[in-house]
Image (cartoon, rainbow, N blue to C red):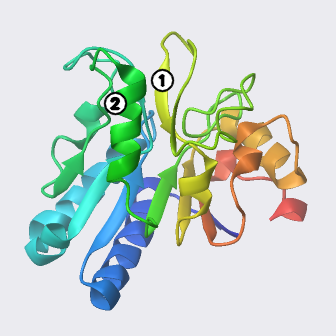
Amino acid sequence: MRIVVTDDPAADAAAVIVRRLRAAVRRRGSATVAVSGGSTAPPMIAAIASVFRTESSLAAAVTVWQVDERIAPDGDAARNAGQLSDLPCAVLLMPVANVDLRAAARRYANSLPDRFDVVHLGIGDDGHTASWPPLEPSVPLSDRLVELTEVFNGLPRMTLTAAPVNGARSRVVLARGASKRPMVEGWLRGDPSLPISGVRRGGTTVILDESAAPGASLR
């Protein structure tokens, strides 16, 4: 695990993701990334979109999936999908408006690459990542690649499970704000009650602002 503390975590997270996508395109001719929603994601996604608009050949080689999504109608403000609308590349949205959500989750799982080049994650104030609820440990540990949750922070969710997240070639965790610091410290101490503790440390870069950063002894 690599921990980066910076004044502009969103821009630095975007830069790490773009570098890994470029490397994947050079090696394999295409690149895959899964992106989380949440309050920290929009500036990072905007920075990635800006690079893609400049590097059209890179954008043409990249496909974006969602890490998680709230189950709500298309166009609902609660959805993460709107955060991805300005990305000038292929974007595969989670089909959370379908009537048969279990079948929709299976179809989305079938669309996933064998291995993501990079997965972006955030950290909630309760220690969740993706849509792995603190009180539903069976969600990340499911043998499905895409799982459904009960109501979590107001709405049920569709989410990638631990298998595709931890099977990715790399992960970028982005967090900012003092409310995230106890969760980051708990993760680094190995607190099993925090869903973020289910994220593989090897191949993971954690990008934080100073207020979210753990004490020096944990870095």
Q: Which residue is mark 1?
A: 157
Q: Quadrant of residue 53?
A: bottom left
Q: CA distance from mark 1 to mark 2?
A: 12 Å
Describe the element under mark 1 as helix, strand or loop.
Answer: strand
- The image shows residue 171 at horizontal and vertical percentages of 55, 63
Label placed on residue 104: 2
Residue 174 vertical position relative to residue 100 in the rendered view, above or below: below
Residue 216 vertical position relative to residue 37 in the rendered view, above or below: below
Describe the element under mark 2 as helix, strand or loop.
Answer: helix
Taking the image as drawn, is residue 208 in sight? no
Amino acid at pointer 2: Ala
Q: Quadrant of residue 194?
A: top right
Quarter the N terminus occupies: bottom right
Horizontal side of 103 relative to 73 (left or right) equals right
- Upstream in sequence: badge 1 or badge 2: 2
- The image shows residue 38 at horizontal and vertical percentages of 45, 34
Mark 1 or mark 2: which is in front?
A: 2
> Pointer 1: residues within 10 angstroms few (<14), some, or many (20+)?
many
Horizontal side of 24 relative to 58 (left or right) equals right
Q: Quadrant of residue 192?
A: top right
Q: Nearer the viewer, residue 36 or 125?
A: 36
- The image shows residue 5 at horizontal and vertical percentages of 62, 62
Amino acid at pointer 1: Arg
Label placed on residue 144: none
- The image shows residue 31 at horizontal and vertical percentages of 31, 72
Horizontal side of 194 relative to 18 (left or right) equals right
Taking the image as drawn, is residue 116 in sight? yes
